[in-house]
Amino acid sequence: MIVGSPPRGASVSPSTHGEPVLVRLRLIGQMEAWTLTSQNVLPSGRKTRALLAVLALSSPRPVLRGKVAEMLWSRRPEEQARASLRQEIHRLSEALAQVGAQILAINRDHLALRPGTVWIDVEEILRATPERASPLTLLDGDLLEDLDGVDPAFDIWLAGERERLVDRARVLAEQLLREKTDSASVIVAAQQLLAIDRSHEGAWRALMRAYAERGERGMAIHAYERCRSVLADQIDAQPSEETQLVAAEIRAAAPLSRPAPPAAPAPPDQRFPMRTPLRTEPRSEVRPTALRGGARVGVLPLQLIGTTEMEAHLSIGLADEITAALARFRWMFLVSSNALARFASQTRDEAAIRRAFNIDFLLDGSIQRVPDAVRASLRLLDLRAGNQVVWSRRFDRAAKDLLTLQDDVAAEVVAQIEPEILMIEGQRLAARPLTDVTAYELVLRALPLLSRLDRAQFMQAGELLRQAITLEPDYAAAHSWFAFWHIFLFGQAWTADPAAVMAEAGRLANRAISLDPQDARGLAIAGHVRAFLHGRLREALVLHERALMVNPNLVMAWALSATVFAYLGELDEAERRMRHCKKLSPLDPHAFFYDTALIVVALLKHDHAAAVAIGREVSEMNPAFSAACKPYLAALGHLGRTEEAALVRLRLLSIEPDFSAARFIELSPFERAEDRLHYLAGLRLAGLADG
């Protein structure tokens, strides 16, 4: 790059804020910062650079100082982290002082870059459009590739930002590819898309077809071989049947069956004037879940009750934040909160909203000022059940920290209403005849049967999931939930061939994430298969962390990742994740499954009384869940509570008649010998037979 010039030929966009651009900041690849007079103002310290990167990628929104401190010094006490942050702010201010003008906006609670004063390459990519797609050429490396390892919390945040950037570029590149018709343009567009996402099978197929149409069949076959190699390296998968068919046609020199051209946009349906899903467009080879069916959800801007102008902004911002967070769940269809705004300012008529947008569930509520706090009261209405209130919650937060209120409330609301909607949808479908059903409907029918752990109903759930996969072999969610079903089949010892169940669970989980690598639940389930069934704990952690990057509000991912940390003996981290899990969803319908990790953590911390208390609570939620009985029983053994231990042992053996100390040793996923021995000693003290 020429010093002092925009990276790789990109032009510096004029400021939209009326202020001149003073610094050009490159975040893709090696981080760089130049003034208009070619002065290098990049700070020397990695933490200082990381601070600048956080401010740049959050721009124009300010960032809470506390969040930055936690992100960059996650292993330090809060006061030490804040003190370190103050030092880095001073260093950053010194580095940028050469500009000769104020770029940082700093107050007691927030940090920000002054709008319009910094040109940022990432912003150019995020603002790119099909008509102005040249900024895609800026994406020629990883985001902040020289800042890995600054801090574990920063690494997780950075991975999420990388995913966000690549997703945005991928969606635009996919759109550009769809618009190309002649083979030469298709080749260029496909190669651009593959530069962003090497495992994009749709782009590989387009490239293969384009080469074949130009008579370059050798290049087409070479593209297929590269596709196969990339998929094997990156996601341990083979090309899909569709891709293999294209390759076979090319090898046979048969006429290519061209995909149908994209249909012209349908005229707007007056019943759905502004209805758009708020999720990035799925890859062309993956059929989006929303097309199979899905709950249609809308979020109204919150009603204002005696609030100031600042809370008025929060009303809209909170609705947008909740809508965007819900859109991370693949099975929901979201109506833009902007589309609902006119109803929020007029009648808030639920019947009119349902008629206009065909919404199934509507989240509504209010914001009001109370002494020293802001109160957000929210409720979820089932519009198909006569506007029945199916969930409600009140949140009180300090009035001085509205940004934190918005983030925290949105996270908790989303984590709590998603399983509620899933359960309601399953119950509604269960009441209908089992005729002319879709794979989506079969999956939803299976879920309540699975979680009850009644053996006959559980087996029925497995058959429904098997039918869903037969009906739609490329449906990622069906594969994920069927893998989840196999975990319980193994864990409850309801199989005569455990090895076959373990292998099938692994196959299903791998297939699910190859079909939809952006489905957080699929990643979390695959991680649990790796950990619980196969004992590959560090591989499991990678999948869980990716799930949390994709959807940080998925309770399942927090709980299952906590379980892996318990297996590893990192009990404080396991406990921290479970606390966050309980904060997100205190009364989760699947708490019997998730809270078992809390029993294990208390047992391994030798807090046997706490383990027994949690064990009792979990057993009351679902007495048929054998996994919760085991640490509960071991804690009772260490406490010498023989009568209660006898009852729990009897319940456990009624579910798993062959469970013994030897069986525990055989299946134990715990990495530390002292943890295995402590657990085993408790089971023996509780009267469990050795073999």
Image: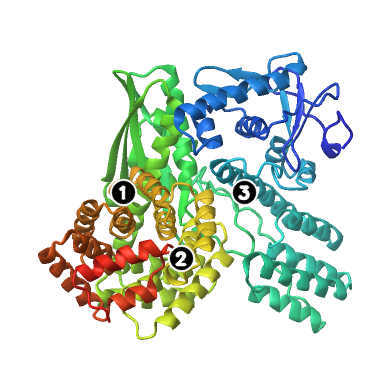
Of the two numbered discs 2 and 3 in the rendering, the one whose residue sits closer to the viewer: 2
Is the Cβ of the residue at disc 2 closer than 8 Å to that at disc 3? Answer: no
Which type of secondary structure does the marked residue at label 3 adopt?
helix
Instruction: For residue 85, say whether it is visible.
Output: yes
Q: Mark 3 sits on what residue?
A: 163
Determine whether 306 is above or below 454 in the image. above
Answer with mark 1 or mark 2, whichever residue precedes in sequence: 1
> Residue drawn 33% across and 62% down?
426
> Which quadrant is the N terminus positioned in?
top right
Residue holding disc 2: 531
Residue 135 screen position, x and y as percent: 77, 41
The residue lying at 64 percent from left, 49 percent from top is 167
Q: Secondary structure at mark 2?
A: helix
Q: Nearer the viewer, residue 256 or 64?
A: 64
The type of residue carrying mark 2 is Ala
Q: Residues within 10 Å of mark 1 (few under 14, many from 20)?
A: many
